[in-house]
C-alpha cells in the first residue's frame, strides 16, 4: 500500500499593503475583491480593534485584534473576498495595517 503526497507551492505575486484608520463606528478597511487569495490584518494601535470578515458591519463582539500587534491572517484553504470592516472602543481613530494579494 502506498500513499500520495502533494506539494502545494505558494502563488508568486505582488500584493498591496496599506495603513488604514479605524473609527469608533464600523469602518470599511478593505473593499471587496473577488480575486483575493491572501489577507492579513495587524493592529498597530494602542487599543484593541475588532474586525468583521463576512462583509457585515463590525461590532465589539467580532474577531479581536489585541493592541500593539494583534493580527488575523486567512487560513491556507480559504480567503474572504468581501468587504472587511473594523471598529474600536477607544477614542479617536486607530490604525491597522492591511495586506492583500
Image: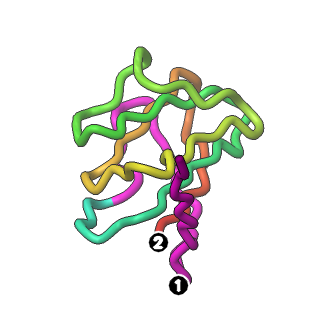
Q: Position of residue 43 (x, y in %)?
A: 65, 42
Q: Residues within 10 Å of mark 1 (few under 14, many from 20)?
A: few
Type of secondary structure dominating the magenta stretch: loop
**Is 42 on the left or on the right of 100, as rendered?**
right
Q: Is residue 93 within the magenta segment?
A: no
Q: Is residue 13 within the magenta segment?
A: yes
Could you tell me which residue is drawn at 55 percent across and 53 percent down? 40
Q: Are marks 2 and 1 in contact (CB under 8 Å)?
A: yes
Question: Which of pointers 2 and 1 lies earlier in the amino acid sequence?
Answer: 1
Q: Residues within 10 Å of mark 2 (few under 14, many from 20)?
A: some
What span is colored magenta in the figure? 1-30
Q: Position of residue 59 (x, y in %)?
A: 36, 22
Residue of label 1: 13
Q: Position of residue 16 (x, y in %)?
A: 52, 75
Q: Nearer the viewer, residue 14 or 65?
A: 14
Residue of label 2: 101
At mark 2, the secondary structure is: loop
Could you tell me which residue is drawn at 34 percent across and 47 percent down? 84
Amino acid at each position: 500500500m502506498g500513499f500520495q503526497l502533494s506539494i502545494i507551492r505558494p502563488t508568486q505575486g505582488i500584493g498591496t499593503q496599506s495603513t488604514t484608520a479605524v473609527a469608533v463606528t464600523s469602518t470599511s478597511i478593505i473593499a471587496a475583491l473577488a480575486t483575493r487569495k491572501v489577507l492579513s490584518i495587524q493592529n498597530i494601535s494602542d487599543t484593541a480593534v475588532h474586525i468583521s470578515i463576512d462583509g457585515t458591519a463590525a461590532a465589539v463582539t467580532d474577531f479581536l485584534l489585541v493592541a500593539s500587534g494583534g493580527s488575523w491572517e486567512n487560513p491556507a484553504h480559504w480567503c474572504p473576498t468581501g468587504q472587511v470592516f473594523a471598529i474600536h472602543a477607544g477614542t479617536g481613530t486607530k490604525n491597522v495595517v492591511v495586506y492583500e494579494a
